Amino acid sequence: MKFLDQAKIYIRSGDGGDGCLSFRREKYVEFGGPDGGDGGRGGDVWAECVANLNTLIDFRYRQHYKAAKGGHGMGKNRAGAGGKDAVLLVPPGTQVFAEDNETLIADLTAPGERVRIARGGNGGFGNARFKSSTNQAPRRANPGEPGVEMTVWLRLKLIADAGLVGLPNAGKSTFLAAVSAAKPKIADYPFTTLHPNLGVVRAGEVDFVLADIPGLIEGAHDGAGIGDRFLGHVERCRVILHLIDATEADPVAAYRTIRAELAAYGAGLTEKPEIVALTKCDAIVDEAAKGQADALRKAEGVEPHLISAHSGLGVDRVLYALAGVIADAQAEAETPEQEARWTP
């Protein structure tokens, strides 16, 4: 399935139906009076979060969504039918922005959530509404209110428990393929991964979702390599797994580059728990791998794991470390807040 995390669409709610100008006409009924019904209300445009979607690819092939118009009023005080709503089915983690792509309209994170984006127009009044003691035969009926039309942006931010970050070709896709059933493209050149991938990982009795995003480069927070969109996919993660290629000449510089991009992007990414791992440790001798780990430890104060997704070295330890952080975060989220006690 193709992955799409941003789409621009046009929406329009339905016009309200016109009110009816009608008078009762029956044999032997003199001066029947007005009996024009009201117009029906136009349909709304809704965004609904559903569980069986994980991409916005459907919106590439259809960009126009219009709700139905309300039915016109009719004689014998018959009101018009309401217009049918238009519903946008989106995956969890979808945000709806206004045309400026900055004003947030809605943020849908859980299946079943539903929000109205554009309200349908009200139906017009029929002439029966305007009858009064001084105007027994009004010849007036209102037209329906027009619907709302607008352009909106849909932006998907994946909902995963853990996110993989690192420079291009750091071994993120290889790690995801080794620990889950996901099948991302793997090759020995940078930017092999062009869109995020998700995989379900089991560590002991804990299952969690791991997200692999394309490699980040310097300037990613400003959109270099469309890194600003990639970083959005780790906003909702509970923990970050930072992978560094052990064959790098300067792992400290690689670590600092990614941390600087996370800080520049904001959204609390630098405050998330982080686990650091040196990958491809089977490609160098043990002394060299330990030397790279010592350099990171002294320069940045982090304790990196030495792993190899190819041989399985240290992978289980990293998974259990991720599972521990995720379990703690879930327990903290489920703990009810203590009510503040009133002190006289």
Image: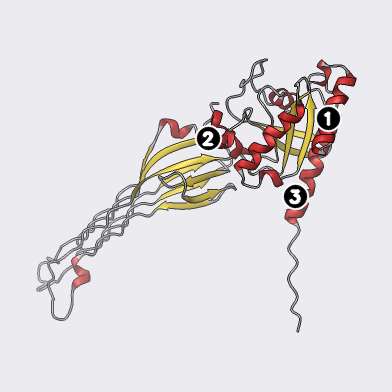
Residue where numbered disc 3 is placed: 330
Question: Residue 5 got which mark?
Answer: 2
Q: CA distance from mark 2 to mark 1?
A: 37 Å
Q: CA distance from mark 3 to mark 2?
A: 26 Å
* Residue 251, above or below 17: above
Residue 212 x, y percent position in the rendering: 66, 31
Determine whether the residue tagged by mark 2 lies in a helix, strand or loop. loop
Question: Residue 295 got which mark?
Answer: 1
Front residue (pair 317, 116): 317
Q: Earlier in the sequence, mark 1 or mark 3?
A: 1
Question: Residue 225 got which mark?
Answer: none
* Residue 258, above or below 338: above
Residue 79 x, y percent position in the rendering: 27, 60
Q: Name which residue lies at 68% across and 32% down.
A: 257
Crowding near the residue tagged with mark 3, few <14, some 14–19, many ≥20 C-alpha atoms within 10 Å: few
Lateral position of residue 152 relative to residue 210, left or right: left
Q: Quadrant of residue 80?
A: bottom left
Lateral position of residue 138 relative to residue 315, left or right: left
Residue type, label 2: Asp
* Residue 267, above or below 221: below
Q: Name which residue lies at 39% across and 36% down.
A: 63
